[in-house]
Image (cartoon, helix red, strand yellow):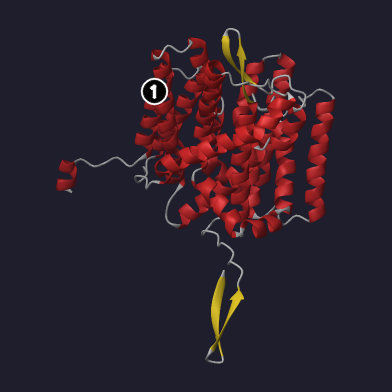
């Protein structure tokens, strides 16, 4: 790009000018936004990598390409980004709650607003997937394939339920952070460790699901320290020591079989291994914030970050339907046109992954653009009733639990959509009746 500068009244010289760095929106941190956008993309690419389809004599088989693969466990040490994602959620939530209070709002408004932002795109995708499953059943598709599609769609929804729970409790835990920051963090972390101990001692895996609260709430709480600037204020040697120390302890626990070397096995249910990983990731994030700020200010990087963050929930919720649709298309191509579908982890399969990733990314981006109006629309005024906000969050969480525990079927999708719409109605400010408005 060039601009003309007048020199000595008559001479014009074209001189290059670098594009001005993109400015961050008020109350936002461009570097943190870039990390969050990167995390969303990692999730999309990882789930796409795990999606496998092969043709057998009985027909197409949809499988998890990572099952039994030697390459997956080492990869999880790089791509397990959920701990830092929840830390960023605490960081952004702390700043967002502070900004809301500065405008005269409160914790109730924060929770109701989060319900709206999270569950409006969720209601749409669950309704569409339910309709798609019904259409597949009517078309005579093998019921087992329909069930697998519903199961695969629902798997990533755990994040929606856990994140909604954390955000619903954020105002209360933020108050605790302001009055007793270390004690609150310590109590949550200790609870997570005790859950792991009880699960291992008693041999009851179901106990571990308590850490769907304690692990993610602890990581969210770490995000408050990052938002306060307390982590960045630590000397670099302390932060480096924290990163190396946490990673070292995690490696030692893995080597002694306390935790699985596959960090995704430590996700369902969550274990305290993710706390150690989150400490290491947060320390590195703090050390890199200066460089992240410089990189994120570049125009193209900022455009990427803005695109993803403005549609983050839409991308997260829709990428699995895109993956499943493309996998189904490959299966049909293999059955009717003789397309060869390489087995997962073979050299031929790896050679096709870039093209597969490109298809998933483009398809998800197109869907995100097409339905972005849902996530970016102007939302109704939120309720001022703590009871309504609590019911809204609870209805949303129950909907996700239903879809996960009961499997996503036509019926559970219908009930889940109803619960999500109920949550949205509870989150908004009730409309006054015309008669009441006339009297007032």
Q: Nearer the viewer, residue 294 or 69?
A: 69
Task: Please tell me in which quadrant of the rendered image residue 162 appears.
Answer: top right
Crowd class of label 1 (few under 14; some 14 to 19; many from 20; radius 10 Å): some
Furthest residue in direction top, as rendered:
58
Left or right, residue 420 beside residue 292: left
Q: Residue at x 61, y 50 (%)?
A: 34
Q: Would you place residue 5 above or below residue 411 in this image? A: below
Residue 276: x and y, percent?
74, 36
Furthest residue in direction front, as rendered:
337
Q: Residue at x 71, y 51 (%)?
A: 286
**Kind of element beneath mark 1:** helix
Q: Would you place residue 139 above or below residue 211 in this image? A: above
Q: Residue at x 58, y 43 (%)?
A: 89
Residue 31: x and y, percent?
63, 54
Q: Would you place residue 91 above or below residue 291 in this image? A: above
Specify whether residue 180 is in view: no
Instruction: Name the residue tied to disc 1.
Output: 131
Specify whether residue 327 is in view: yes
Q: Nearer the viewer, residue 94 or 152?
A: 152
Image quadrant occupied by the N terminus: bottom right
Q: How many marks?
A: 1
Q: Nearer the viewer, residue 17 or 38?
A: 17
Residue 49: x and y, percent?
65, 29
Residue 357: x and y, percent?
61, 35
Left or right, residue 108 beside residue 215: left
């Amino acid at each position: 790009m060039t601009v003309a500068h007048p020199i000595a009244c008559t001479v014009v010289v074209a001189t290059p000018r670098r594009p001005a760095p993109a400015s961050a929106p008020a109350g936002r941190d461009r570097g943190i936004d870039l990390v969050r956008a990167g995390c969303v993309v990692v999730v999309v690419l990882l789930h796409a990598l795990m999606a496998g389809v092969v043709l057998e004599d009985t027909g197409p088989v949809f499988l998890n390409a990572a099952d039994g693969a030697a390459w997956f466990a080492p990869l999880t040490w790089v791509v397990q980004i959920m701990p830092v994602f929840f830390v960023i959620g605490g960081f952004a939530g702390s700043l967002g709650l502070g900004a809301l209070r500065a405008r005269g709002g409160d914790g109730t408004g924060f929770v109701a607003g989060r319900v709206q932002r999270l569950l409006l795109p969720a209601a749409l995708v669950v309704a569409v997937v339910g309709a798609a499953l019904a259409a597949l059943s009517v078309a005579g598709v093998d019921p087992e394939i329909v069930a697998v599609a519903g199961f695969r769609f629902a798997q990533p929804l755990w994040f929606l339920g856990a994140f909604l729970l954390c955000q619903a409790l954020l105002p209360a835990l933020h108050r605790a952070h302001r009055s007793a920051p270390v004690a609150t963090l310590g109590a949550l972390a200790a609870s997570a460790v005790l859950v792991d101990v009880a699960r291992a001692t008693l041999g009851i895996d179901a106990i571990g699901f308590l850490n769907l609260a304690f692990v993610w709430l602890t990581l969210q709480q770490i995000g408050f320290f990052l938002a306060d600037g307390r982590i960045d204020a630590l000397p670099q040697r302390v932060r480096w020591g924290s990163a190396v120390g946490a990673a070292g302890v995690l490696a030692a626990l893995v080597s002694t079989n306390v935790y699985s070397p596959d960090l995704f096995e430590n996700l369902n249910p969550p274990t305290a291994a993710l706390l150690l990983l989150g400490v290491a990731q947060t320390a590195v994030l703090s050390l890199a914030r200066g460089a992240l700020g410089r990189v994120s200010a570049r125009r193209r990087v900022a455009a990427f970050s803005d695109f993803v963050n403005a549609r983050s929930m839409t991308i997260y919720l829709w990428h699995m339907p895109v993956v499943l649709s493309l996998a189904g298309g490959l299966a049909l191509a293999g059955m009717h046109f003789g397309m060869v579908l390489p087995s997962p982890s073979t050299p031929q399969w790896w050679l096709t992954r870039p093209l597969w990733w490109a298809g998933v990314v483009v398809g998800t981006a197109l869907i995100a653009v097409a339905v972005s109006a849902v996530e970016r629309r102007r939302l109704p005024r939120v309720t001022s009733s703590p009871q309504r906000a609590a019911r809204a969050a609870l209805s949303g969480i129950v909907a996700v639990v239903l879809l996960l525990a009961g499997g996503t079927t036509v019926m559970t999708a219908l009930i889940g959509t109803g619960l999500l719409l109920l949550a949205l109605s509870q989150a908004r400010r009730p409309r006054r009746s015309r008669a009441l408005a006339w009297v007032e």
